[in-house]
Image (spheres, helix red, strand yellow):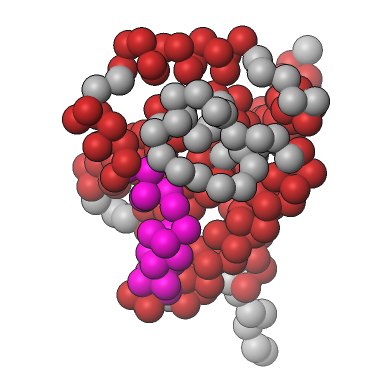
Amino acid sequence: MQKTWSLIRQNIKWIIVFVCIGIFLAIAEDAFHQEIMRMDVAGQNFVHNCLYSAPLTALFKVITTLGGPVVLISLTILLFFLIKNKKIGLAITVNLVITVILNQIFKFIVQRPRPEVFRLIDESGYSFPSGHSMCSMAFYGFLIYLIFTHVKNVKLKWALSIILALLILSIGLSRIYLGVHYVSDVIAGFIFSFAYLIVYISFIREINLKTKQPKLAQK
């Protein structure tokens, strides 16, 4: 039994990836068959009946842009030139490119129409999975990893990470609130990108370990 728990602890990140992908595929199957899940109806009703207000609408219209292509591409370019270590800048860029490509592939396969009710903004394209949610989780989530890896000030590290985490959640909520995505679109986007981040960060760390291997001392 102890060996089993030890094996689980050693492979916990890959277990999480497996579970996340399983949940994502289960949601994707329902979305592929154009099914509206209970959580979709409950989410739409909750937003419309309990949250809707003019000030909140204005706020979410601003927040949702922070997960859009213009802001994410602009931030990627800005960080690439501002960060001295170009390997980090390249990793940020590649991360966004991969996420966008994967999102477009999923949208093309599933082809789920967007919600028709409670629509507060115009949005084109398919609904599943939410591109804003998927890309913001991957982009800002990777920034959280970089902050924890490179920022030495503990208070600043946690403050920035919490702000970015709240931003990710707010962007997802904004897509539901504005009526351009179902709850399942947002959850699926978050879940897939979380699993993807584990794989991507593991890959980045593996590359760094290989490039930082010490040379054998010359005799």
Quadrant in the picture for the N terminus:
top right
Quadrant in the picture for the C terminus:
bottom right
- At x 66%, y 18%, the residue is 36
Measuring from the top left, give residue 73's x and y in whole percent. Answer: 45, 65
Most distant residue in the left direction: 55
Measuring from the top left, give residue 188's x and y in whole percent. Answer: 62, 31
Q: Tell me if 136 is positioned left or right of 102 in this view.
A: left
Most distant residue in the bottom direction: 219
Q: Nearer the viewer, residue 38 or 163?
A: 38
Q: Is residue 75 magenta?
A: yes
Q: Nearer the viewer, residue 157 or 185?
A: 185
- At x 47%, y 58%, the residue is 69
Q: Nearer the viewer, residue 159 or 1?
A: 159
Query: Main structural element of the magenta stretch: helix, strand or loop?
Result: helix
Any part of residue 204 in sight: no
Measuring from the top left, give residue 113's x and y in whole percent. Answer: 66, 35
Q: Nearer the viewer, residue 72 or 7?
A: 72
In the rendered view, would you say 187 is above or below 48?
below
Measuring from the top left, give residue 35's x and y in whole percent. Answer: 72, 20
Q: Quadrant of residue 207?
A: bottom right
Q: Tell me if 15 is positioned left or right of 202 in this view.
A: right
Q: Magenta residues, as a range?
A: 63-80
How many marks the image carries: the answer is 0
In the rendered view, would you say 18 is above or below 125?
above
- At x 60%, y 42%, the residue is 193
Q: Tell me if 70 is positioned left or right of 152 in this view.
A: right
Q: Is residue 174 magenta?
A: no
Any part of residue 98 in sight: yes
- At x 38%, y 64%, the residue is 75
